[in-house]
Image (cartoon, rainbow, N blue to C red):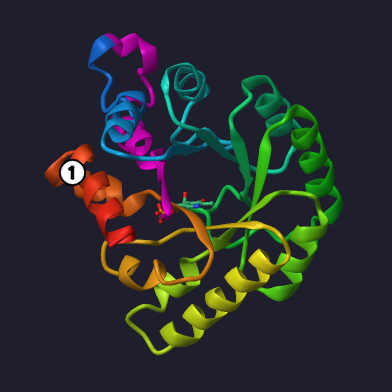
Amino acid sequence: MILLGLNIDHCATVRQARYRASGAAAGGVVEPDPVALALEAERAGADGITVHLREDRRHVQDRDIWRLRECIATRLNLEMACTPEMTKLALELKPDSVCLVPESREEITTEGGLDVVRHHERVKSCVEAMNAAGIKTSLFIDPDEPQIELAAQLGAPWIELHTGAYANAYYGTGRAAEFQRLRIGCALGHDRGLVVNAGHGINYVNIAEVRALPHLHELNIGHSIISRALFTGIGEAVREMKARMNA
Ligand code: PXP
């Protein structure tokens, strides 16, 4: 069975769109609350909750991650840039796992995988710190051989293959090639002893194909589920995605 990690960043995006300036001063009317959403999603079958604490705190806030750490019953996966500041914070928070992602201020969301070949030393020291603290590290990388081979050497138990290029190509001519790239990446990661996750741009349509990728452990999905929840509520949106993931 493929597990679902629900990324709740976009719940915080909606909250910040209205309450960025007022924050706690607005009291009980500050909504939507990502923690309440996470708890409801867990009740509907989400296997883990993912949040990305960005350097510019554009959506998820520090207070959110501490509240999540205290409240959720499944697993907390913290997406973060590979920086000393974030490493220190993760070691204090002790999430169940961290996912190292690239981060640049211009991005609306994460646009490409972390280049572990280029940032080898930085990634290695972060992975070592997490391993020593018993926190699992996942590396969010493009499904390319050099990235996967190096990821396997860096001592991180998990990889998350970036499905964004495939999702973007879904209605174009590159779809089959991108799918094949992911298929080869999954097989290689598994062969190297890595737990293989995937995420970015997965929705209720392309999941029919994504779920056929070999050796998938968990999918991290955010935008499509949060969007559907506007119409159905988060419980139904989670149940529907889980049903399609494991049909
Ligand atoms: N995985 C990672 C590492 C991400 O950065 C994101 C986007 O925040 C996702 C998964 C989820 O992508 P989407 O919101 O497109 O489902």
Give the farthest residue toward the front. 1
Please identify the quadrant where the N terminus is shown.
bottom left
- Residue bearing mark 1: 236
Most foreground residue, 209 or 50: 209
Residue 23 sits inside the magenta stretch: yes
- Identify which residue is drawn at 62% across, 22% down: 93
Please identify the quadrant where the C terminus is shown.
bottom left
> Would you place residue 80 above or below residue 33 in this image?
below
- Asked if residue 55 lies left or right of residue 50, the reply is right
> Would you place residue 87 above or below residue 23 in this image?
below
Q: Position of residue 67 (x, y in %)?
A: 45, 18
* Amino acid at dot 1: Glu
- Asked if residue 14 lies left or right of residue 120, the reply is left
Snapshot quadrant of residue 132: top right
Q: Position of residue 15 (x, y in %)?
A: 31, 30
> Would you place residue 27 above or below residue 147 in this image?
above
> Would you place residue 54 above or below residue 161 in this image?
above
- Identify which residue is drawn at 25% across, 11% down: 28
- Asked if residue 206 lies left or right of residue 146, the reply is left
Give the farthest residue toward the left. 231
- Identify which residue is drawn at 66% across, 28% down: 90
Secondary structure found at label 1: helix
Most foreground residue, 236 or 164: 236
- Identify which residue is drawn at 73% across, 65% down: 192
The mark total stands at 1
Residue at mark 1: C-beta within 8 A of ligand 1: no
Residues in magenta, as a range = 1-27
Snapshot quadrant of residue 73: top left
Residue 26 sits inside the magenta stretch: yes
Q: Position of residue 168 (x, y in %)?
A: 41, 73
Q: Position of residue 54 (x, y in %)?
A: 56, 38
